[in-house]
Image (spheres, rainbow, N blue to C red):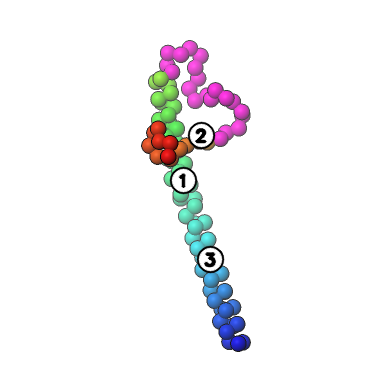
Amino acid sequence: MGYGMYKVGEGNRERRALKEEKKAARMAVVPALQAEEDRRYLEKETKRLEEEAKLMKDVPGWKVGQGVYETGKWMPPAERPGPVGSYL
């Protein structure tokens, strides 16, 4: 029975080490993934502002990029995944 408990402890240590390794690998990749998402967001936001400027050019007093509701706190816009008009 003593040997069995030893093997259980050994397995627990191995499982813990693998879990820590997996966590470290994920943490190493996060900055690259965040940079990709930031780049994608910036490109999308630039296109959106260009479209807004083109669409609202004839409206007097319209400021491109300024929201209708100003809270003073930046929040990323809510995005629905999928094609435009998709409700699924």
Residue 41 screen position, x and y as percent: 45, 38
- Residue placed furthest toward the front: 88
| Image depth: mark 1 or mark 3 in front | 3
User: What predominant SS class does the magenta segment belong to?
Assistant: loop
Q: Is residue 42 above or below residue 63?
A: below
Q: Residue at x 40, y 30 (%)?
A: 47
Q: Is residue 67 above or below residue 18?
A: above
Lower sequence index among marks 1 and 2 = 1
- Residue placed furthest toward the left: 83
Looking at the rendered structure, the kind of residue marked 3 is Lys
User: Residue tagged by mark 2?
Assistant: 77
Q: Could you say whether the residue bearing mark 3 is in a helix, strand or loop?
A: helix
Residue 11 screen position, x and y as percent: 54, 76
Instruction: Judge the density around disc 1: few (<14), some (14-19), many (≥20) Cα neighbours within 10 Å.
Output: few
Q: Residue at x 41, y 26 (%)?
A: 50
Q: Could you say whether the residue bearing mark 2 is in a helix, strand or loop?
A: loop
Q: Which residues are magenta?
A: 56-75
Instruction: Assess whether residue 62 is covered by the magenta stretch.
Output: yes
User: Residue tagged by mark 3?
Assistant: 19
Between 63 and 7, the residue placed more toward the observer is 7
User: Residue tagged by mark 1?
Assistant: 35
Instruction: Assess whether residue 80 is covered by the magenta stretch.
Output: no
Q: Residue at x 42, y 29 (%)?
A: 48
Q: Are marks 1 and 3 in contact (CB under 8 Å)?
A: no
